[in-house]
Amino acid sequence: MRMVLAIAALLIATFSTQASVTTSPTPASSSTEQVDFTRKAIRRAYDHVQGNNIPDAIVALNDAIQSDGFEYLPGDTRYAVLVLAAQANTENGDHTAAHALWVRASELAQANRNTWHSRLAAAFRNRDYPDSAHCVTTIARRWPKTLNKIRDQAIYRIETELGKDATQADARQALLESLFNANWTDIDGVANRFWRDLAQILLAKDDVQQADPVAARIRSARIAITMRIDKSFDRITQGNPDRYDINRLAADELAAARVAVESTPGQLRLWVRLQQLLLDTLQHDQALAIADDIIAKTKDGDGKSIYEDFDDYYIWVLNQRAEALARLGRWDEVVEQLSRATRRPENGGMNVSQILNLGWYYAFLEQPAKALDTVSELGEMSPYGRMQLEMVRLMAALQQKDEAAVATHLTYMREHRADAINTWQNALLFSGDLDAAGDLLVERLISEQWRGDALASMQGYADVPRTPMEAVRLQRWREVLAQPKVIQALSEVGRIENFDLAG
């Protein structure tokens, strides 16, 4: 409400100073009544805002904006009215109307960075990802230093959604190029996936000269793997073997992560990233030791005083501890750790991530009743999360030989496979439909959107302990990789190598 009042005050101040000024464009004499009507509507809106009557203020503002006299008002007044109306509609919960008003306000000469950030917030709230991308692109080009006001997760989500729509290819390229030129990085100081994707776009247009410096910013061993194994990158990877040395990149990443935690030990997210890189490089004992040290330091309730982001990342410290235990084959301890983690909130609500992970492990350990009981109270979640939930239910149904439930879960996952295509791949493996699994893998290899993850999943990685059910999945996966149709599809787009990282 404070923001609405402040804008209203600014509006009336601007409005008052311009009351005696000739409007532009100058209305014909026949339009004077229209302008008077518009001005009166604006004053009514101001009075309603002062009286904390937002709904009636919105009605009056709509009268003004939709009136024939609105376009005769000075630009400053029109801009202030549109901004006030956008803020009022936001406060009133009408985000669709608010977004439309921010779009109009941003098209005026008076629009500034705050206008565009507000338009972005409204577009993102409405899941209008094309306009969200347009906003981020504009901000990156005009006010690059304000990109840090946009959450990393939002930028990644916007780019991901654009990637699902072929008609948005140009907008996606513009977004990535604007972020690259603005030297944008996420909270961890990287944006490796973005630079790989931009390089791929440029290579598809035969622009090797621009693609090479874009790819040179990549510092991730995992991302570099996806480029080494994908023939579409050969023009920049084959001539730069040192740049794509996976062991060197992994060592450099790990060293940088160690420096980060030493320089800023109070940020738990940095410790989580270090844990993940240790797990990647098979240093499971060290990842476990980090978790144990953090747990010991915070056991008396001092977590928030030691780590500024404790509430957001502590559950991931526990999750990585469980992963380290799994890599060591200590399955009972994995279940115990995840069970404790599920009791901690995630984003202020039910800990969906750890509950799903616990359900997965119960299913992997062939305890279907416990798996189903664990996930039984989960409510609404993301489309990706729902696919993980269906996977837990499917594995449990397979173990219980419940054919009706198996059919139900496979039907749902088939219809929603695009929400988590790799999960659907695993569903086919677990259900034993290896011919369909091969067809899907071929489809993924052909698809520009899915190829990278598909190729990455086909590589040889360091062996780690596996539950019996995971071992069955791996054996079936190898059978799929040996299918002639898969071998043929692979030969056209990529290759298989072996890497000293966890699979």
Image (cartoon, rainbow, N blue to C red):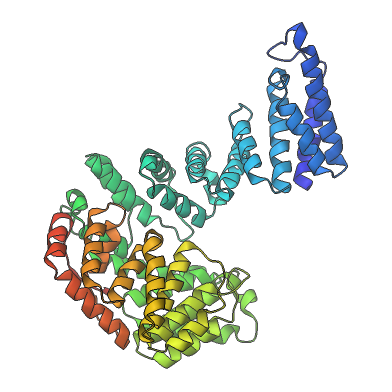
Q: Can I make out residue 317 in this image?
A: no
305 up-or-down from 131: above or below: below
Q: Is residue 191 left or right of residue 84?
A: left
- Residue drawn at point x = 65 percent, y = 75 percent: 305
Judge by depth and name the residue closer to the eye, 408 or 193. Answer: 408
Instruction: State the image coordinates of residue 202 (x, y, percent, origin top left).
Output: 28, 42
Instruction: State the image coordinates of residue 250 (x, y, percent, origin top left).
Output: 30, 68
Q: Is residue 444 left or right of residue 257?
A: left
Instruction: State the image coordinates of residue 140 (x, y, percent, origin top left).
Output: 48, 41
Instruction: State the image coordinates of residue 459 (x, y, percent, origin top left).
Output: 22, 69
- Residue drawn at point x = 81 percent, y = 21 percent: 37
Judge by depth and name the residue closer to the eye, 192 or 99. Answer: 99
Quadrant location of the C terminus?
A: bottom left
Q: How many marks?
A: 0
- Residue drawn at point x = 79 percent, y = 42 percent: 55
Q: Is residue 178 left or right of residue 103?
A: left
35 up-or-down from 115: above or below: above
Q: Quadrant of residue 388?
A: bottom left
Residue at the extreme front of the image, as rendered: 404
127 up-or-down from 286: above or below: above
Judge by depth and name the residue closer to the eye, 397 or 381. Answer: 397
Q: Quadrant of residue 470?
A: bottom left
Residue at the extreme top of the image, as rendered: 29
Q: Is residue 333 left or right of residue 426?
A: right
105 up-or-down from 152: above or below: above
